């Protein structure tokens, strides 16, 4: 298991080959994150966005723009389209969301002709380092798939497992979350979906992971909660990955952990034809840097465990 981001980022190799392109780069946290990546020697960047604003923010933050290529586009949709195009033609390896709408950014990636689609379902993965949990915790999907059906949830689960495997996990422990640990198909349909996915894991239809569900969040993360409830589970109290029922629960999970729980977070999109960094606008520059690092590591397939 990976205990923290420090363990993860120490495996990043210095590379002149990695270039990040940002759609709507006029944001101080984004520019500071890119500057950290540049200073660490892991990636440089192309900035697409409103030049005047980028220049002012860079000056305010003592960032030397000579180190970056800058493409002046004010309009959000055009800036996203240009950034995606740059990745598609191989002039950058990682796409990053700047100060633009998540839905517009994702639509740019999903564009049938010019996007970064693959044969897979695309999903968002958040990785948390919480002061109150003993290792990194992966969670999906808080930002892309809004109301996933069972088929989507299976793909979201597989994407998250594959991301963990690409970092070197052997058999990540996956909790399919609901509000309860018993199936209540009448009133809590997500509990029934969770049970099906867990059974698919047990029967080897979803591979390379130990999957349990339905689990409430306390059962997934707290051994004490399982003791009290008398629940015996290989995943319970020690989950590596939490799969949430829908975007609302994921979004609330994400923000509760970062705001109330003071967790550090990285956010990436899985399943696209190139690594994609997607964080919340309000996330810190550190979170944006960690997201670039996580996207690079997952896509490199370099085992860090
Ligand atoms: N993976 C692969 N293909 C997809 C996916 C996916 N996750 N989602 C849609 N597609 C394909 C569809 O098969 C279809 O071919 C095309 O894309 C368009 O599909 P629609 O019409 O369902 O999708 P859109 O363009 O209306 O919406 C896609 C979004 C990702 C924009 C939408 O799901 C969305 O708004 N998600 C939430 C984004 C958001 O606001 N997040 C904020 C939380 S912080």
Image (cartoon, rainbow, N blue to C red):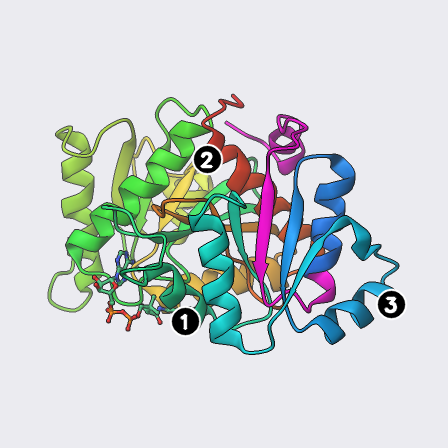
State the mark number for residue 103: 1
Asked if ligand 1 lies within 8 A of label 1, the reply is yes
**Sooner in the amino-acid sequence: mark 2 or mark 1:** 1
**Residue 120 position within the rendered picture, expressed as x and y whole percent measured from the top left:** 25, 46
Residue neighbourhood size for the residue with mark 3, other residues' Cα within 10 Å, grouped as few (<14), some (14–19), many (≥20):
few
- In the rendered image, residue 13 lying in the magenta stretch gets the answer yes
Write the start and end of the magenta stretch as one range. 1-29
Query: Mark 2 packing: few (<14 Cα in 10 Å), some, or many (20+)?
Result: some
Position of 43 relative to 255 (above/below): above
Residue at 42%, 49% (x, y): give it. 88
Do tag 3 and tag 2 residues touch (Cβ < 8 Å)? no
At numbered mark 1, what does the secondary structure look like: helix, strand or loop? helix
Q: Is residue 252 above or below residue 276?
A: below
Residue 161: name its quadrant. top left
Is residue 116 found left or right of 299 in the rendered image? left
Position of residue 56 measured from the top left corner of the image (x, y, whole percent): 81, 72
Q: Quadrant of residue 142?
A: bottom left
Say the numbered circle drawn on residue 299: 2
- Closer to the chain start, of discs 3 and 2, is 3
Q: Say which residue appears at 31% left-offset and 67% top-offset.
A: 146
Mark-to-mark CA distance, 2 and 1: 23 Å
Q: Nearer the viewer, residue 227 or 71?
A: 71
Label 1 environment density (alpha carbons within 10 Å; few <14, some 14–19, many ≥20): few
Q: Report x, y in % for residue 265.
A: 58, 51
- Which residue is the site of mark 3? 60
- Of the residues under marks 3 and 1, which one precedes in the sequence? 3
How many callouts does the rendering have?
3
Report whether 143 appears left or right of 5.
Answer: left
Given residues 163 and 217, the one toward you in this image is 163
Badge 3 marks a residue whose secondary structure is helix
């Amino acid at each position: 298991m990976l205990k923290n981001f420090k363990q993860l980022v120490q495996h990043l190799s210095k590379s002149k080959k990695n270039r990040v392109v940002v759609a709507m780069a006029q944001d101080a946290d984004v520019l500071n994150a890119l500057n950290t990546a540049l200073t660490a020697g892991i990636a440089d960047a192309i900035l697409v966005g409103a030049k005047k604003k980028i220049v002012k923010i860079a000056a305010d933050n003592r960032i030397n723009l000579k180190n970056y290529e800058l493409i002046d586009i004010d309009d959000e949709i055009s800036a996203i389209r240009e950034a995606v195009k740059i990745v598609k033609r191989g002039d950058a390896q990682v796409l990053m969301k700047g100060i633009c709408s998540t839905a517009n950014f994702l639509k740019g990636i999903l564009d049938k002709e010019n996007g970064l689609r693959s044969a897979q379902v695309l999903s968002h993965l958040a990785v948390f380092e919480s002061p109150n949990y003993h290792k990194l915790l992966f969670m999906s999907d808080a930002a892309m798939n809004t109301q996933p059906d069972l088929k989507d949830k299976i793909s979201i689960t597989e994407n998250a497992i594959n991301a963990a495997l690409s970092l070197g996990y052997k058999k990540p422990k996956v909790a399919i979350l609901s509000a309860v640990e018993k199936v209540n198909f009448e009133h809590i349909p997500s509990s029934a979906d969770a049970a099906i996915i867990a059974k698919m894991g047990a029967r080897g239809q979803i591979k390379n992971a130990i999957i349990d569900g339905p689990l409430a969040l306390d059962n997934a993360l707290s051994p004490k909660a399982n003791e009290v409830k008398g629940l015996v589970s290989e995943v319970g109290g020690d989950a590596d990955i939490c799969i949430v029922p829908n975007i609302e629960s994921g979004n609330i999970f994400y923000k509760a952990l970062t705001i109330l729980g003071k967790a550090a977070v990285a956010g990436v999109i899985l399943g696209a034809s190139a690594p994609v960094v997607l964080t919340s606008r309000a996330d810190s520059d550190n979170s944006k840097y960690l997201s670039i690092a996580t996207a690079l590591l997952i896509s490199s397939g370099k085992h860090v465990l």
